[in-house]
Image (cartoon, rainbow, N blue to C red):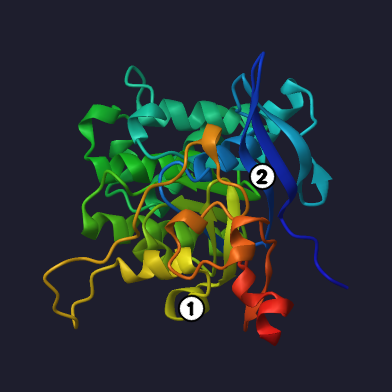
């Protein structure tokens, strides 16, 4: 019997609905994440990555709203829950790690107080038990002398240490799903590796599913089990991270991988994808990537492709892998 995925997104559409027009920001996104698995969601700024995470957590603000599809957590639909129920799910069953830890931490309260309040909001324990859990969590995320740091304020920590505290906050109620939205962007490279390694280890130990949202393919390669590549609100490629990184199939993914500098390859100039991401109000007909694609064929200009088998574990939304093209 096939296990129910921790997170399942089916045909999700998110639109900005105004008086005179609708702008589609997320179009037909479908994803699954199993318990203990890290799925990386990668793409340029404006691709719709963070908006996907926001839709999952129920934090979309008007005029943005879900207009099609559904989101399930452990088989239970959550996108249509009342606000009160969704708040409980968001704290108890879904943990969130944001890009800037200062937006997640109250500068007026000690980190210990914030952890204890979060734990007691979602778990029925005494103050003493909550304090013990909080100190244990601070130790798990690698803070030295967690008992002493319990009474420290956020400004007394470095950026990397604050991000560790935010991870502790996200995990304090043992969530089934953790959404990490650009959790390492503001950190030094060495600290980035520590944070992503920590997040991956803790979630594996707790069997939590992880959606790791980032623009950094290097972070994805080091952390994720599978990767979904997003462009203009759609998934254009998805597969095992090793297959996608070493043998990208969609022209957009190929461009992303080619733009990463390599130590063994000397070059005077970095490769780049020509052009820019199209604005929501002016998406091209057909495949949204076709104006920037060096392998464009006529069908790309007329019809948007769906995900189709490209190779191995990888599916790609590209007509280069369609049956008609293959026959030619």
Q: Residues within 10 Å of mark 2 (few under 14, many from 20)?
A: some
Q: Is residue 296 above or below residue 101?
A: below
Mark nearer the viewer, 2 or 1: 2
Q: Which mark is residue 129?
A: none
- Considering the numbered disc 1 on the image, is that residue within a helix, a strand or a loop? helix
Residue at (43, 57) in percent of width and height: 292
Residue at (35, 35) in percent of width and height: 101
Separation (CA) of disc 2 from disc 1: 26 Å
Horizontal relation, residue 318 to residue 156: left or right: right
Q: Can residue 21 be seen in this view?
A: yes
Horizontal relation, residue 273 to residue 8: left or right: left
In front here: 81 or 284? 284
Taking the view exactly as shown, the residue that stands out farthest to the right is 1
Taking the view exactly as shown, the residue that stands out farthest to the front is 298
Which comes sooner in the sequence, label 2 or label 1? 2
- Considering the numbered disc 2 on the image, is that residue within a helix, a strand or a loop? strand
Q: Mark 1 points at which residue?
A: 242
In front here: 119 or 244? 244
Q: Is residue 78 above or below residue 153?
A: below
Q: Name the residue under label 2.
A: 27
Q: Position of residue 198 (x, y in %)?
A: 40, 59
**How many numbered dots are placed on residues in this image?**
2
Q: Position of residue 307 (x, y in %)?
A: 68, 65
């Amino acid at each position: 019997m096939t296990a129910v995925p921790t997170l399942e997104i089916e045909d999700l559409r998110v639109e900005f609905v105004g008086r005179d027009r609708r702008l589609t920001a997320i179009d037909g996104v479908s994803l699954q994440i199993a318990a203990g698995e890290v799925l990386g969601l990668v793409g340029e700024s404006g691709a719709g990555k963070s908006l996907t995470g926001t839709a999952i957590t129920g934090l979309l603000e008007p005029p943005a709203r879900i207009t099609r599809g559904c989101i399930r957590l452990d088989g239970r639909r959550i996108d249509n829950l009342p606000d009160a129920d969704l708040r409980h799910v968001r704290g108890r069953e879904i943990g969130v790690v944001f890009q800037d830890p200062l937006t997640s931490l109250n500068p007026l309260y000690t980190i210990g107080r914030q952890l204890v309040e979060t734990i007691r909001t979602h778990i029925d324990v005494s103050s003493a038990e909550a304090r013990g859990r909080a100190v244990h969590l601070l130790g798990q995320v690698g803070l030295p002398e967690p008992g002493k740091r319990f009474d420290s304020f956020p400004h007394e920590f470095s950026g990397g240490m604050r991000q560790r505290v935010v991870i502790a906050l996200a995990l304090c109620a043992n969530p089934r799903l953790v959404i990490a939205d650009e959790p390492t962007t503001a950190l030094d490279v060495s600290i980035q590796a520590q944070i992503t390694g920590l997040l991956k280890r803790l979630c594996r130990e707790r069997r939590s599913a992880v959606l790791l949202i980032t623009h950094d393919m290097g972070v994805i390669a080091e952390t994720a089990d599978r990767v979904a590549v997003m462009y203009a609100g759609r998934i254009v490629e998805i597969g095992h991270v090793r297959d996608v990184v070493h043998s990208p199939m969609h022209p957009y993914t190929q461009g992303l991988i080619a733009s990463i500098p390599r130590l063994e390859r000397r070059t005077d100039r970095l490769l780049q994808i020509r052009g820019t991401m199209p604005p929501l109000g002016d998406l091209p007909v057909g495949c949204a990537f076709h104006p920037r694609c060096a392998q464009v064929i006529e069908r790309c200009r007329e019809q948007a492709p769906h995900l189709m088998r490209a190779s191995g574990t990888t599916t790609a939304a590209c007509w280069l892998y369609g049956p008609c093209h293959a026959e030619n």
